[in-house]
Image: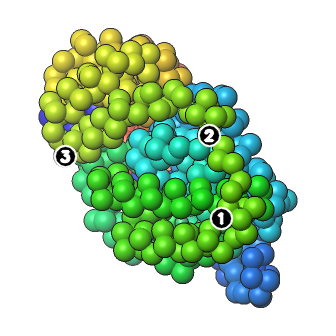
Amino acid sequence: MAHPYVVNPRLFSAHAGSSLFRSAMGAVAALVLGIGMLGSAACTVNPVTGKTQLDFMGETQEIQLGKNLYPRYTQQSLGEVPDPRLEAYVDRVGLKLARVSQRPQLPWTYNAVNDPEVNAYALPGGKISITRGLLSRLDNEDELAAVLGHETGHVNARHAAQAYTRQVLAQLALLGAGIYMDAHGTRNARLYTVAGMLGMQLMFASYSRNQERQADQLGFEYMTKAGYNPEGMVGVMRILLHEGKAQPSLLRRMFADHPMSSERLATAEASVAAEPPAVRTRPIRSQRFLAAVRHIRETRPAYDRFAKARRLLARKKTAEAESLLEESVAEWPDDGLLRGYLAGAEAEDGKLERAMQDAQRAGDNAPHIFVVQMLAGKIFLRAKRYAAAVPFFDNASRILPNLPEVELLRGEALEGAGRTREAARAYEKVRRLAPGSDASAEASRRLRSLGMATAK
Ligand SMILES: [Zn+2]
């Protein structure tokens, strides 16, 4: 039971090494190099400070980087919350802030993602996400505006662009040194984490304390300009401080720093006190907000258990995770994400028949969530039900195209189902996507065993 979601350990071990990551990072490197970010550092004017600064990319490149990272980050965060009304609402609130900010012309998008942890993050170029875990803990639109305003501040002050640039450069350096795998953790961790399923390690940007202070200040400015009650910022800081004490593990990047949380709360309180009474006494908007988040508030206990279960799975405490997930699924039987993870835990526990039933239903209920499609595909592959596995890998490949890991598994399912020519095309794709990698070597080996010639 070393690696639960994998039918064929050899298949995974063959490309669990740094090479797969290298290929994925290769794509990022190509993007970065292609847009001339390296070696062409230029002086640009910081939109917030108005000062000239040394920068690695211009606005066009920044937008392109965000656009390229966005699908993978959204899927790493377990996909968009399947509630179009909520998505539209979050976007509308965010756009009100963007419009009064220093860079209204960016292609801003704001979305809510299924991650049950308490978090929010910004990608360069104006792509901002808030997690279900945080959203379900807020009480009104003014608090939502505070969170989105803070993230908008990170983008406008170019913190996000700088952090992701640093991250890409650091990963490229590690790859150059060939030491990435050591930091990447074990093969098992890869199977349980979405990052592993994505075939690459995605990280949230980390900001300095000064950058956090600046983002708070900018967020406060935007929300006040947009007509919100700045008390919302205080509310958010209280929630974060409380969550940090109650469940430190639930908190990620944005608010991970506890001493800073109390400082930030004090700053927010002082800022509110400095505003004129007309601003301080603005009505708090909770009615529209509560209507929009009704479902995610109702499902919060189930998703809090889900958060716990994911941590248990990562520590191989399968039985405990399974019972938490069962409880959540009993409550929300049509939630594909919860049921998908339950299926995974069942498969890990050797209950393959039940796992397949749950995987099928989960896959049908969550057609847009990459991790669910991957789990379902792997479970059917494990049961050697190749034909049933194919549609799930097809979906995964549609959601996030061009991941060598997905194409290799898809090839295996197609091959098992007797669809040899399509399998060969999938293996050829792996070779094109990740030349020189272990995944490519495995694809070549499989092509040869199919009797297909492999040049190179
Ligand atoms: Zn921040």
Q: Where is residue 25 drawn, in percent x and y?
A: 51, 59
- Kindly identify which residue carries mark 3: 315
Residue type marked 3: Arg
Closer to the N terminus: mark 2 or mark 3? 2
Closer to the N terminus: mark 1 or mark 2? 1
Q: Where 306 sits versus 199, above or below?
A: above
Query: Marks 2/3: CA distance?
Result: 39 Å
Residue type marked 1: Gly
- Kindly identify which residue carries mark 2: 286
Q: Secondary structure at mark 2?
A: loop
- Kindly identify which residue carries mark 1: 219
Of 91 and 231, nearer the camera is 231
Q: Secondary structure at mark 3?
A: loop
The residue sitting at 34% across, 38% down in the picture is 304
Residue 27 can be seen, yes or no: no
Q: Where is residue 360 drawn, in percent x and y?
A: 40, 14
Q: Is residue 263 left or right of residue 5?
A: right
Q: Secondary structure at mark 1?
A: helix
Q: Where is residue 427 drawn, in percent x and y?
A: 48, 35
**Number of numbered discs present?**
3
Asked if the beta carbon under badge 3 is closer than 8 A to the nearest atom of ligand 1, the reply is no
In front: label 2 or label 3: 2
